[in-house]
Image: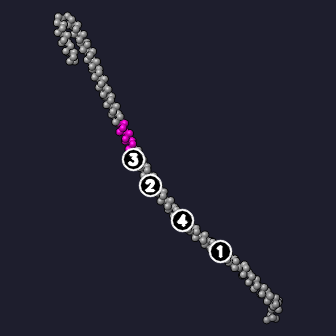
Amino acid sequence: MNDLLTNLGIDGKLLLAQIINFLILLFVLKRFLYKPILEFLDKRKKLIQEGLENAEKIDEKLTKIDEKEEKVLTKARVQASKIIDQSKQIGATQASKIVSDAESRVDNMILDAKSKIQGEKEKMLQEAKAEISDVVLEATKKILAHSDNKKIDEEIISNTVKKI
């Protein structure tokens, strides 16, 4: 075998030294480089796994928050709708109240106007009666001025004028 290695141009002692050097290098690399790299990779794998778990938790929380937000928005929309309906009802109530108040004011104004008109009418009738009675009295006096029973005629005229 020694001849075979020599024929191939390989020195046995050098080969043995290279194998020993390779094993020493393998031991050193495994001890000082391979283990720390594996530990680093394991830590990195754990960090990535934790990050993925946290991302899933965050996604779940975001989903819950979105659901809560939708519930709150729905509730707010319902309340806003109720407020709008109440405002419309209050507005309609106030509008009808304003209309009824205006109608009652108009009715009061009409009644006041009618009473004023009635008062004015009575006043005018009184004035007209007074003027008519004065005119009738004067006309009767002129007619009776030619007659002899002045005193009796004046009494009749006064009674007649008072009845008017």
Query: Which mark, residue 43?
Result: 1
Q: Is residue 91 visible?
A: yes
Is residue 100 in the magenta section?
yes
Q: Residue at x 34, y 36 (%)?
A: 104
Instruction: State the separation of the CA atoms marked 2 and 4.
Output: 25 Å
Q: Is residue 162 above or below residue 100?
A: above
Sequence-first disc among 3 and 2: 2
Circle 3 residues within 10 Å: few <14, some 14–19, many ≥20? few
Give the x, y percent position of residue 140: 21, 10
Instruction: State the separation of the CA atoms marked 4 and 1.
Output: 26 Å
User: Where, quadrant-wise, is the C terminus in this rendering?
Assistant: top left
Element class at badge 3: helix
Instruction: State the separation of the CA atoms marked 4 and 3.
Output: 41 Å
Please provide the residue range marked out in magenta: 93-103
Give the x, y percent position of residue 46: 62, 74
Q: Amino acid at mark 3?
A: Gln
**Left or right side of 4 for 162:** left
Element class at badge 4: helix
Element class at badge 2: helix
The residue at which mark 2 appears reads as 78
Check whether the beta carbons of the residues at disc 1 and disc 2 lie within 8 A of each other.
no
The residue at which mark 4 appears reads as 61
Sequence-first disc among 1 and 2: 1
Q: Residue at x 20, y 12 (%)?
A: 157
Q: Is residue 13 above or below residue 163?
A: below
Instruction: State the separation of the CA atoms marked 1 and 3.
Output: 67 Å
The residue at which mark 3 appears reads as 89
Number of numbered callouts drawn: 4
Q: Amino acid at mark 4?
A: Lys
